[in-house]
Image (tube, rainbow, N blue to C red):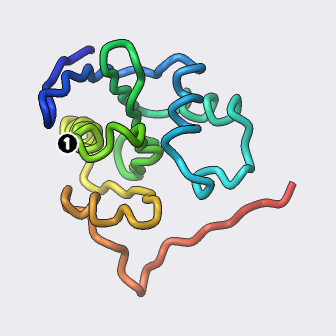
């Protein structure tokens, strides 16, 4: 499905519920993420293969240029994780990220998903709080494990 919307400052964008082509995704990833995101552990081919395994994703275009992306990893019932929300720097603070989040959360609501978690880049917590997200309780923190293979 493709939906045309106008966001802040009369910026026409197209929301497409599908994967971007690989070349577009790699460009967006390079421009819109920082080193925290994959920590150099994955090749661009591996990152693209990862998004291809998403439960749901949304690509945002201005004209024909990919300017934003977000995805959900889920079993469709219980465990749901929003990740890889990214917007080209020159399109940040123009409502594009908000449109990505609205689209992802609407899909969760449409499917009756009750609990949604997300991964956030440092300093972006305030953005996600606008959508009702809260930090995990200190008594139930998230944890991470990296295998050294």
Q: Residue 75: in sight, yes or no?
A: no
Residue 118 picture location, percent across and down: 40, 56
For residue 140, above or below residue 57: below
Lateral position of residue 49 relative to residue 104, left or right: right
* Furthest residue in direction right, as rendered: 149
Residue 22 picture location, percent across and down: 58, 20
Identify the residue under disc 1.
Answer: 109
Residue 35 picture location, percent across and down: 62, 54
For residue 22, above or below residue 45: above
Residue at 19 percent of width and 59 percent of height: 130
Residue 91 picture location, percent across and down: 32, 37
| Residue 126 falls in image quadrant | bottom left
Lateral position of residue 114 relative to residue 139, left or right: left
Lateral position of residue 43 relative to residue 48, left or right: right
For residue 138, above or below residue 123: below
Label 1 secondary element:
helix
Using the image as rendered, state which of residue 120 and residue 117 is in the foreground: 120
Q: Residue 98: in sight, yes or no?
A: yes
The quadrant of the picture occupied by the C terminus is: bottom right
Using the image as rendered, state which of residue 79 and residue 122 is in the foreground: 122
* Furthest residue in direction bottom, as rendered: 139
Residue at 41 percent of width and 52 percent of height: 79
> Count of labels shown?
1
| Residue 59 falls in image quadrant | top left
Residue at 51 percent of width and 32 percent of height: 28
- Mark 1, residues whose alpha carbon is within 10 Å: few (<14), some, or many (≥20)? few
Residue at 46 percent of width and 22 percent of height: 19
Lateral position of residue 63 relative to residue 45, left or right: left
The quadrant of the picture occupied by the N terminus is: top left
């Amino acid at each position: 499905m493709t939906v045309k919307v106008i966001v802040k400052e009369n910026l026409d964008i197209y929301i497409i519920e599908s994967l971007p082509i690989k070349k577009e995704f790699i460009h967006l990833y390079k421009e819109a993420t920082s080193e925290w995101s994959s920590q150099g552990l994955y090749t661009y081919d591996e990152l693209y293969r990862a998004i291809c395994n998403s439960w749901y994703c949304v690509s945002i275009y201005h004209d024909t240029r990919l300017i934003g992306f977000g995805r959900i990893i889920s079993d469709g019932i219980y465990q749901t994780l929003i990740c890889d929300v990214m917007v080209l720097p020159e399109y940040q603070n123009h409502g594009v990220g908000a449109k990505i989040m609205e689209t992802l959360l609407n899909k969760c609501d449409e499917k009756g998903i009750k609990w949604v978690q997300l991964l956030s880049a440092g300093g972006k917590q305030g953005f996600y709080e606008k959508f009702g997200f809260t930090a995990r309780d200190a008594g139930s923190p998230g944890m991470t494990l990296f295998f050294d293979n």
